[in-house]
Amino acid sequence: VYAVRQSSLKAGDTAVVFGLGPIGLLIVEALRAAGASKIYAVELSPERQAKAEELGAIVVRPEEGETAVEAIHRLTNGG
């Protein structure tokens, strides 16, 4: 996928995908194929969350009062 090829992703890097519609799910697969070690996925739809988990993504589920970005910082220890 063009977006992944144009990114500076290297094998072992961590990535985040916002939105898990057909394109977002394709990006998850492309990131995995490109060697991403962890792929965090942000999506409200439980069905799309489940599909992303099937593809190996870590679904970000913000705690009460927490934004998705804050949740990612929590899950990655600020990284």
Image: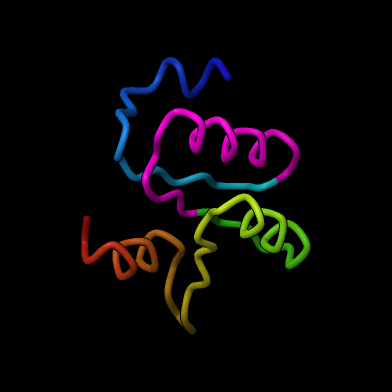
Q: Residue at x 58, y 20 (%)?
A: 1
Magenta run includes residue 26: yes
Left or right: where 10 falls relative to 71:
left
Q: Residue at x 22, y 66 (%)?
A: 77
Main SS of the magenta part reads helix
Tell me if residue 55 comes above or below residue 13 in the rendering. Answer: below
Tell me if residue 35 comes above or below residue 68 in the rendering. Answer: above
Task: Locate the C terminus and report the quarter of the image it occupies.
Answer: bottom left
**Magenta region, residue range:** 21-40
Residue 62 picture location, percent across and down: 48, 73
Q: Tell me where residue 2 sits by quadrant.
A: top right
Left or right: where 7 falls relative to 51:
left
Q: Tell me where residue 14 sits by quadrant.
A: top left
Display colour scheme: rainbow
Q: Residue at x 39, y 39 (%)?
A: 36
Residue 48 picture location, percent across and down: 73, 56
Residue 54 picture location, percent across and down: 66, 57
